[in-house]
Amino acid sequence: MKKTNLLIIEDSRVFAKGLSMLLSPLKAIDSIFIALNYEDAMQCLKSENISIAILDLHFRVATYDGFTIAEKLSVNFPFVKIMILSDYVQTDYYYRLFENTSVKAYIDKQCDESELFEGVRSLMNNEIYLCASIEKLKEIEKWMILTKREKEVVKLLVKGFTQSKISRILFIAEKTVGRHVMNLLRKFEVKNTAELVAKYVAYKNSNDEDVDSCTPPFQQI
């Protein structure tokens, strides 16, 4: 059986070591390396024969993030298959990564270890792998393509505001608010605002849409 060398790029030393211990029993893996920052990752990739890189998206620095590292790997080490293992699960991140980098797997850190193992096996077989959380988001994204104004309206509906109050808050006519609400009902495939609010909240709970409001924004080198 052909074995592979794996690199974990993660700035949490405890998490990286735990992940290494979790993956080490897999017979298909030869050696596991850990890089706690961008510089160490680049050095390891230059000196070791790495086949798979497991990469987080958020790093506690202002100079780079997981997107930056994925882009650098794709240019400088195109034969390395990248797995994203992150708490930040969003469909726009999925498209950004899969369309612009060598990322071939995207897994939620909250997933079961069986999905992690399956992701590694898929990459070794040159297959793409998405965990159940990502698959779920892809299924519901078709009705989450909202305009800026629609997002404003639905967020105010979630807060319990009436259409009349929303019109005053947004400085638009109440009829305009009603039109946005009708469009939202159609996109969310629901019959009334109560169902709309419930479905939107369910989406928000499964998608880290507001990640930049609670963590340092992802930046480019």
Image (cartoon, rainbow, N blue to C red):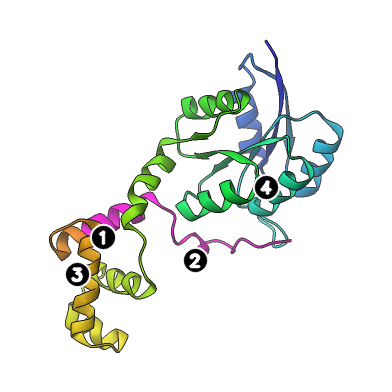
Using the image, tell me which numbered label, if any, was put on residue 70: 4
Q: Mark 3: which amino acid?
A: Met
N-terminal label among 3 and 2: 3
Residue 61, given in percent of the width and then of the height, sits at: 69, 58
User: In front: 49, or 86?
Assistant: 49
The magenta-colored residue range is 197-221
Residue sitting at x 80%, y 37%: 45
As helix, strand or loop, the secondary structure at mark 2 comes to helix
Per the image, the residue denoted by label 2 is 213
Give the quarter of the figure containing the N terminus: top right
**Disc with the residue nearer the chain's start (4 vs 2):** 4
82 relative position to 152: left or right: right
Q: Earlier in the sequence, mark 3 or mark 1?
A: 3
**Corner quadrant of residue 139:** top left
Binning the other alpha carbons within 10 Å of mark 1 as few (below 14), some (14 to 19) or many (20 upward) gives: some
Q: Which residue is mark 1?
A: 187
Tell whether label 1 touches label 4 (CB within 8 Å). no
Q: Residue at x 40, y 52 (%)?
A: 207
Q: Residue furthest right?
A: 47
The extreme left residue here reads: 191
Distance between the Cα atoms at labels 3 and 4? 40 Å
On residue 182, the disc is 3
Can residue 37 be seen here? The reply is no
Q: Position of residue 117 (x, y in %)?
A: 54, 24
Closest to the camera, between mark 2 and mark 1, is 1
